[in-house]
């Protein structure tokens, strides 16, 4: 099959991403988190005191989306900025409430993760992850050749 005969790869990926995001969000709904917020809390747990820029570099979210999610998590008491007042660089940490919420949310995340894994299967999952890495690398190239 030639590239011109294929369905649009980008649109197919976007639809898949939206469907998986909905699945994970549904699994985390009882804990009041979205998959984006869950991911941010996981990153902060693994790197306490990280800055907003460090998080942005790792999670590849648009800055406005990242700022909105961090603000929401801080307002809900899940995370706190431990930097000194007036300092520009944030130092994000999970609060005890955030640690508790993340621990409780891990069960829902694991259910969604297991559902996807079981539907796809081990062999296809390895191939899928390799293809996803390749697609990310292609997307990060500066130009279309």
Image: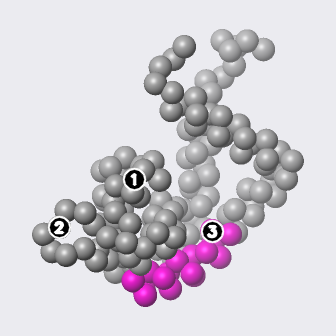
State the residue in front, 12 or 100. 100
List the residue tagged with mark 1. Answer: 56
What is the distance, in whole Å, between disc 2 and disc 1 at their CAs? 18 Å
Q: CA distance from mark 2 to mark 3?
A: 35 Å
- Could you tell me residue 13's position as x and y percent? 60, 36
Q: Which residue is mark 3?
A: 109
Q: Residue at x 33, y 60 (%)?
A: 52
Identify the secondary structure beneath mark 1: helix
Discs 2/1, front:
2
Residue 97: within the magenta? yes
Question: Is residue 76 positioned above or below 19 on the image?
Answer: below
Dividing the picture into quarters, in which one does residue 77 lie? Answer: bottom left
Q: Quadrant of residue 114?
A: bottom right
User: In this picture, which residue range is highlighted in magenta?
Assistant: 95-110
What label sits on residue 87 in the rendered view?
2
Sort mark 2 into few (<14), some (14-19) or many (20+) by Cα contacts within 10 Å: few
Counting from the top left corner in percent of width and height, residue 97 is at 42, 86
Single out the mark in the foreground, 2 or 3: 2
Q: Are marks 2 and 1 in contact (CB under 8 Å)?
A: no
Q: Quadrant of the C terminus?
A: top right
The count of marks equals 3
In the image: residue 124, left or right of residue 87: right
- In the rendered view, would you say 103 is above or below 41? below
Q: Quadrant of residue 109?
A: bottom right
Looking at the picture, how far across and down is residue 80, in whole percent?
32, 77
Tag 2, which secondary structure? loop
């Amino acid at each position: 099959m030639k590239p011109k005969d294929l369905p649009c790869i980008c649109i197919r990926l976007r639809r898949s991403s939206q469907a998986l995001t909905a699945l994970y969000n549904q699994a985390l709904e009882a804990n009041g988190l979205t998959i984006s917020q869950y991911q941010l809390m996981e990153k902060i747990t693994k790197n306490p005191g990280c800055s907003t820029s460090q998080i942005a570099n790792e999670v590849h979210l648009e800055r406005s989306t990242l700022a909105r999610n961090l603000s929401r998590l801080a307002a809900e008491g899940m995370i706190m900025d431990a930097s000194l007042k007036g300092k520009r660089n944030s130092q994000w940490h999970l609060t005890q409430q955030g640690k508790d919420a993340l621990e409780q949310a891990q069960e829902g995340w694991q259910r969604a993760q297991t559902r996807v894994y079981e539907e796809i299967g081990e062999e296809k999952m390895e191939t899928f992850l390799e293809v996803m890495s390749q697609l990310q690398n292609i997307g990060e190239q500066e130009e279309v050749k």
